[in-house]
Image: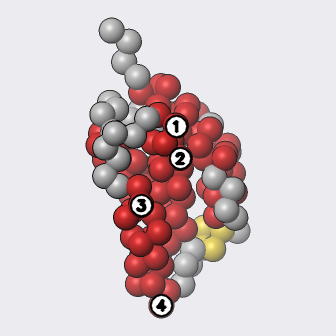
Amino acid sequence: MHKGDFLFAAANLIPDLMAAFDRDYLSNYTPCEDFDESKLIDALARCHVEPIIIHPFREGNGRLSRVLATIMALQAGMPLLDFTWLSEHEAEYISAIHQGHAGNYEPMKRVFSEVLKASMIED
């Protein structure tokens, strides 16, 4: 399965990939209680990219990862996440996914820094 030039995981690999995602990411980063902003951004970046790569369908990958990110942010005491920034900077977001897939999560950390900034409600 692919979308444009981006290949998703083969169906026969999904169970092992999901087990590895749970073991290597979810178990290490959730629940996000007592996370400072830096630790939360790191966790969000890592846990956002991986399901997008694993998810075996052309559509829904980003939605699934945004739901997970929202839950993680709420666990850390943050407000609901405002993902408007993603649609306004789609090329940067897609690039961050590709770079995260290659093991470089720094671009996705920048993305989530912007998302968190946009999500903070001024009193």
Q: Residue at x 69, y 56 (%)?
A: 104
Tag 3 secondary structure? helix
Of all residues, the one furthest to the bottom in this rendering is 12
Residue 46 marker: none
- At label 3, the amino acid type is Asn
Tag 1 secondary structure? helix
- At label 2, the amino acid type is Asp
Q: Position of residue 96 (x, y in %)?
A: 65, 50
- At label 4, the amino acid type is Asn
In the rendered image, which residue does mark 4 sit on? Answer: 12
Residue 38 marker: 1
Q: CA distance from mark 4 to mark 1?
A: 35 Å
Dividing the image into 4 quarters, which one contains the N terminus?
bottom right
- At label 1, the amino acid type is Ser
Dividing the image into 4 quarters, which one contains the C terminus?
top left
Q: Position of residue 31 (x, y in %)?
A: 31, 52
Q: Residue at x 43, y 35 (%)?
A: 36
Look at the image and tell me whether residue 61 can be seen: no
In the rendered image, which residue does mark 2 sit on? Answer: 42
Which circle's residue, 2 or 3, is located before the other in the chain?
3
Which circle's residue, 4 or 1, is located before the other in the chain?
4
Kindly report which numbered mark, 4 or 2, lies closer to the viewer in this rendering: 2
Left or right, 4 with respect to 73, comes to: right
Q: CA distance from mark 2 to mark 1?
A: 6 Å
Kindly report which numbered mark, 3 or 4, lies closer to the viewer in this rendering: 3
